[in-house]
Image (cartoon, grey):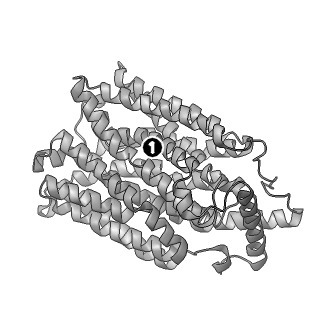
Amino acid sequence: MSSPLPTEQAALVDSAVRRAAKRLIPFLLLMYVIAFLDRSNVGFAKEELEVDLGLSASAYALGAGLFFVGYAVFEVPSNLVMHRVGARWWMARIMITWGVVATAFMFVNGETMFYVLRFVLGVCEAGFFPGVLLYLTYWFPEDRRAFATGLFQMGLPIANVVGGPLSGGLLELDGVGGLAGYQWLFMVEGVVAVLVGIVALFYLTNRPEDAAWMPAEEKAALGARLAADDETRAAHGGHLGWARALLNPRVLYLALVCLCIQAAVYGLTFFLPTQVAQITGRDVGFLVGLLTSIPWLCALAAIVVIPRIADRTHRHREIGAVLLVLSAAGIAVSAVAGSALLAMAALCLAAVGFVAVQPLFWTLPTRYLSGMALAAGFGLINGLGNLGGFIAPNIRVWAEETFDSSTAGLFALAGIAVLGALFLLGTTLFSGRTEDAAQPAPATR
């Protein structure tokens, strides 16, 4: 994207990127793992909540989805605040408040409280994911961003690999200390978020120029490279105001693509434990939790490899579309598979597709936006896109009840994933430049 750097400067940028990745990515990854556990652990608590509180399937689907309504409403304001006050304070605030609310789920006493807490949890967590994406643009040049974003988004499969056995095991503490299994689940995973949020206040660094742990010459080289990327974005409309960015057709279209992706993710995630339990004929617990982690292990391997390939080939759209089609195929086959082995293989394919596509997709907004416009754009795209997490479980339940078929909901999700693939390819229509023209400057690997 930017002009080729002298060899010495390129080496300094490489060193700075490696240093930033080693310092920041593992902690951001930990934060994402905890975030995903706290928003999706209701999938493991589903059966206990239905038995203990009398929640119906439709009430559960509505409550699970309400998280994303609160999340969507406050995404843009949260990201704009973070861009002004810095990631360190704002990320810590987000984690501590969502941890408190996540813990409060142990006191749920009925549908109304379940609905309220799910909505408030979304409000508290709003801005975390797009905030991290924005934060990565402060540290990683464009030709490294899919790789960096892919490392961060390893948190999704890791959360499910770790979360399956952890959540299932906590449910088996039912009765210990006079608490139900779901109360142990919400308490432990919520308190962890609070503790990590406190650590974030001392650990995160806002921008490269503030990094005492990075040599001065590396900071200078990295800053120059990031500035060059900003200049190139400005030539393609990157200096929009944040308010204009919210009405930009590209941003709104990308939000539609994101919605399709998230519908595939959460339409499966919120029901995966019970789906695996049905496949295996076992109750949701530690063993089902272990089996649930298998698709996410496959996704973890894919997200390590595929973003690197996309960065090298500069074919993020095309590869992403193929991944969404594969995800749709996996979801559909899991609905009709005649054996447990085939069903699990199909779920693995689905998880690989909708997990690995995400770091590829999130490189697209950074090609057109920067500064406050990028902060607002990330917030709007992720906020509207995550409404897919509200729509998907309700569409799945609606389809199953309307057609009186346990497979109809999965076919509906597969159709949404195919639409996402078509919409993703459609971004070429408003790109304003070819992929080849958008290729970044050569970088020393």
Neighbor class of circle 1 (other Cα within 10 Å; few <14, some 14-19, many 20+) is many
On the rendered structure, is 333 left or right of 356? left
On the rendered structure, is 434 left or right of 252? right
Please tell me which residue is depicted at 82% across the width and 62% down the height of the picture.
10
Please tell me which residue is depicted at 48% across the width and 43% down the height of the picture.
256
Please tell me which residue is depicted at 52% across the width and 29% down the height of the picture.
325
On the rendered structure, is 217 left or right of 360? right
Establish if 231 lies above or below 359.
below
Q: How many marks?
A: 1
Establish if 135 lies above or below 246.
below
Callout 1: SS: helix
In this view, the residue in front, 277 or 221, is 221
Q: Position of residue 228 (x, y in %)?
A: 77, 64
Outermost residue, top side = 338
Q: Amino acid at mark 1?
A: Leu
Q: Position of residue 363 (x, y in %)?
A: 62, 50
Q: Quadrant of the C terminus?
A: bottom right
Establish if 374 lies above or below 162.
below
Q: Position of residue 246 (x, y in %)?
A: 51, 57
In this view, the residue in front, 199 or 442, is 442
Q: Which residue is mark 1?
A: 259
